[in-house]
Amino acid sequence: MNTLKQPQKIIGRNVISTLETVDIQTGKRKVLAQFDDLIEAPNWTADGKRLIYNSLGRLYSFDIATLVSTIIDTGYATQCNNDHVLSPDNTHIAVSHQTQEDGHSRIYVLPLKGGNPVLITPMAPSYLHGWSPDGSTLAYCAERNGQYDIYTIPVSGGVETQLTDFPGLDDGPEYSPDGKHIWFNSVRSGLMQVWRMNADGSELTQMTFDESNSWFPHISPNGESVAFLSYYKDDVSPGDHPANKHVEIRLLSSAGGEFQTLVRLFGGQGTINVNSWSPDSRQLAFVSYQLKDID
């Protein structure tokens, strides 16, 4: 069983990227734009006007009204992967940037309007996923001593706190809007499944039980629903979330129970690595892909 989080190389893929939204009530998809290169992981800003995505190591702001993308100045952090998260007040953005000296991912924070990044996690590799609703804490997956677990750290930096301790892969930690829980995905049951725990790491609870490998649970702003990405069981190893696969975006009540399939698409890595809920909890933004013809 492959249970290691693979480093994300900042390289292009031979794809056309389609930035889309889907209405969670009707299932209706809407294409916002197509890109002749790789884009990944749209964050929806709190005012509902923009989507923040990454492409080839850089961050961009996409204006939904004008359909125009603008690059965000990230200073020396030009190897950003698809693990970017907006601060609750939307004044800052935290990123996972592959440090030039050793090529390992570390977490940095910078102004959303652009500016110099500040290193938060000296230890590496660290892969960002969550920002607490009170703005004080970041949650991330990190490899320490050969094991990938979930950690938190003050947003100002300092000593990290280990929340899980499991020989396989725990990944994708994200806070619930009330700050009481952290949702994540784990292979501890065999397949990759969605789990929930208290924000202090206690009371781990499995939330999905299907025969798929499910990743990146994202909680709606109203706290009622959880969207996540599912790979078909025979397509991937439980600890792998590759690109260019037939996948599903699924929806689950935050109280648990049966999921519903919202979207079937060709995607995977880059589709919904980050929380992409609209602020009114009615839509999701995501990226689908199409392989380019090779002459």
Image: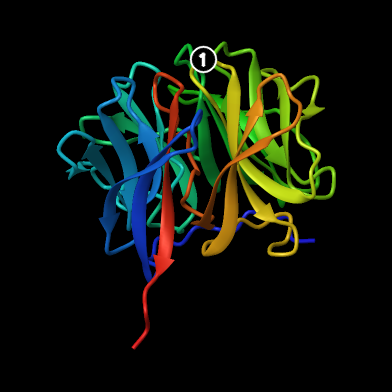
Using the image as rendered, state which of residue 197 and residue 159 is in the foreground: 197
What residue is rendered at 30% in x and 31% in y? 110
- Residue 181, image x and y in percent? 65, 18
Question: Is 205 situated left or right of 38 in this image?
Answer: right
Most distant residue in the bottom direction: 295
- Choose top left, top right, bottom left or bottom right for residue 116: top left
Question: Is 37 situated left or right of 7 in this image?
Answer: left
What residue is rendered at 30% in x and 24% in y? 48
Using the image as rendered, state which of residue 65 and residue 4 is in the foreground: 65
Using the image as rendered, state which of residue 254 and residue 191 is in the foreground: 254
Any part of residue 159 in sight: no
- Quadrant where the C terminus sits is bottom left
- Residue 130, image x and y in percent? 52, 29
Any part of residue 268 in sight: yes
Vertical placement of residue 89 versus 243, above or below: above
What residue is rendered at 34% in x and 21% in y? 46
Vertical placement of residue 219 versus 107, above or below: above
- Choose top left, top right, bottom left or bottom right for residue 135: top left
Give the residue type that dot 1 points to: Asn
Q: Which residue is mark 1?
A: 222
What residue is rendered at 40% in x and 52% in y? 99
Q: Secondary structure at mark 1?
A: loop
- Quadrant where the N terminus sits is bottom right
- Residue 47, image x and y in percent? 28, 20
Vertical placement of residue 295 versus 36, above or below: below
- Residue 225, image x and y in percent? 59, 24
